[in-house]
Image (cartoon, grey):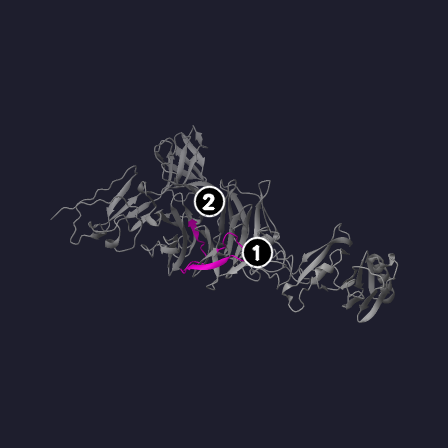
Amino acid sequence: MAIMRDTIANFIGGVSQQTDKLMFPNQSKELINHYLDTVEGLKRRPTSKNIAKLCEPFTIHPYIHTIIKEDEEYEVILDGTTCQIFNLKGEKQELYISNKAQAYIQSQSPLTELYAVTLADYTFILNKTKQVKLSDEKFESAYPHSALIFVKQGNYSTDYSITINGEQAAHLTTSETSAADIKTNGIAQKLASALTDSIGSNFSIEQNGSTILLTNKNSEEFTISCEDSNGNRNLFAFYKTADTSTDLPVVAPNGFVLNIIQDAKDGADDYFVKFKTSDGSNFGQGTWSECPSPNIQYKLDDTTMPMGLVRQADGGFTLDVLKWGERLSGDEETAPNPSFVNNTIQEIMTHKGRLGFVSVDKVIYSDVNDIFSFFKKTVLTELETDPIDIASNSKMVLLKHTLPFNQELMLISETAQFILKGGDTFSNSTVSLDLVTSYQCSKDCKPISLGSNGYFIYENGSYTRVMSLFVTESLTVDAEDITEQCPSYLPSYVYKLAGSSANNTLLALSTSERDTLYVYNFYVKGNERGQSAWSKWQFENAKILNADFNKHLLYLTVQYGDGVYLEVIDFTPKLKDFNLDFNLYLDRKVILSDTTYNAETKETSFTLPYEVKDTNSFKVIDDKGFELTFRIENNICYTRGKHTDIAIGFINTSLWQLPTIYVRQSNGNAIKVVEGTLMLRDINLAYANSGHFIVSPFLFNAFYMVHIN
């Protein structure tokens, strides 16, 4: 019988649920609390360091958002009732919450119903169940029952006539020779006097220059018309409407509104103007500018819109309503409401200098010059800066997420993925939403981008699958299943993906297994994956509420029996504790220098930073790396001897289960298992810098390896 030898270079292929013969030699049946490093190989996962206790335990899973900016690093916790903010040292920040914001963030399921994103100086907080409404406030005309009479020009021997409610109310004929008699302000004064004499009991008449303001005292509707014997080019009356803006007076009451009807047959080009006096007086010189139609709702209800969390100059925060832009022109037809009105908003983002909302089947972008405005500034022309309101041109779906990918923005529904295109100028004339792929996607777990790839999930029965988006050689977008080798490994109800391209690591958090992080280690070069490996990290007696990377640090928000704690995992290679050549593998690790020595009892004591119930896994280590015996009384830990520097924490157990080992031989481009009866004579495990571990047989030709250091 021939003796065959084989070498497996590393075991960084991750977990595979395929049959043993189909598994790659570097894959495993199970990996718990390991890190699959392409340089150092299979090693222990980095341990967590305790930062601080944040608050008391939550009864429901909160939504947590981490603010990572150049000068700001904070944890925002929304528990469905209120909001708390901590810096990444665990220090609580001062926060003012307005009553409107307090009501907006109420939720029975904050993890799935609330959403936050930090954009520039604002952290927008969104309640995805709140239907956006318009404010009940309507745009009012200051003179709803008034008319303007304008003497535009005066001519010799010209008749001027004003008719009110079908009857002539004033008439004037100018002189044939007197220049003073044809001044427009003089004509206006005489007409105003005649109107006062004829209709003064029902109307108030006020004249300023060449303009007369006529107001019905009983707030009743009326009709008015003017005529002159110069082809009706001298005298004009305006009541609610005007045919053109060129005949409007430059002297008028402040706040007077008119509808400019450019085509009596088609109201599509109508617009409204409002007069504003230059000096703020009630009646004087000024200008006309566009305004909304009277008696329509023109403001967004700020209590139904996303709230703004803003850091103040004193270091504290305010959470309050934001001032959203209002309708400045037109009506519901010429300047329609943004499509998120009467619908819910599912996500907020920025793109091409605009603020964007995802709502129902559309994505809605703000005005370029005002990111808080979603109404057109003018209805007279189409501007490149106008808000954008667009749906897919190929498939009607409910959009849920956005994903920056390949220098574009992807819009993702539960069944399809789209790319938003806009050319060099991102505007209504260039934008399109094109279908690129049709894969299932979770509605609750936001996709993320890492390096040149995008990642999203979908639930497959009781398990979760993860898809990776990539750009093909033909520059099209496609996706692949990176859980293909372990289809029933990740549990259902994955609610968050977090990742670090610097560490080539993707994490999946699930409410099904709250004590576990599912870890994907990868290495991608071009379109080739040199590594695609899954494993899991387990944290005893813990409920992981959130995980976010910041450079080489992973911040964890973890709930234990006595409270919610902020912890950090440092991915820096070859860390060391004290002056040792190694790192102490303790979770919730704390390095203590604030100790007290009692010379009488010859004991060192210190206050524990957290509750310790499991004294078997809890360890006290001195600065030489030796384990110390201890006792705990009333949250005070006592240990024999004098120690100024002490490390405390909990040990964790790592597990590695190998598959059945087969001899494989290369056959051209394929590697095949050598058929026959294999008797494993010996196996040599190469390891370095390791603590204590146990190797034990589990099945014929397979092993468990359990680390307990």
SS at badge 2: strand
Q: Is residue 558 magenta?
A: no
Q: Quadrant of residue 654?
A: top left
Q: Position of residue 496 (x, y in %)?
A: 44, 52
Which circle marks residue 565 in the picture?
A: 2
SS at badge 1: loop
What span is in magenta? 421-449
The residue type indicated by label 1 comes to Pro
Which one is in front, 594 or 460?
460
| Label 2: few (<14), some (14–19) or many (≥20) C-alpha neighbours in 10 Å | many
Q: Position of residue 333 (x, y in %)?
A: 61, 64
| Residue 497 seen in this snapshot | no
The residue type indicated by label 2 comes to Tyr
The residue pinned by badge 1 equals 387
| Residue 246 seen in this snapshot | yes
Which one is in front, 654 or 65?
65
Q: As drawn, is 207 to the left or to the right of 383?
A: right
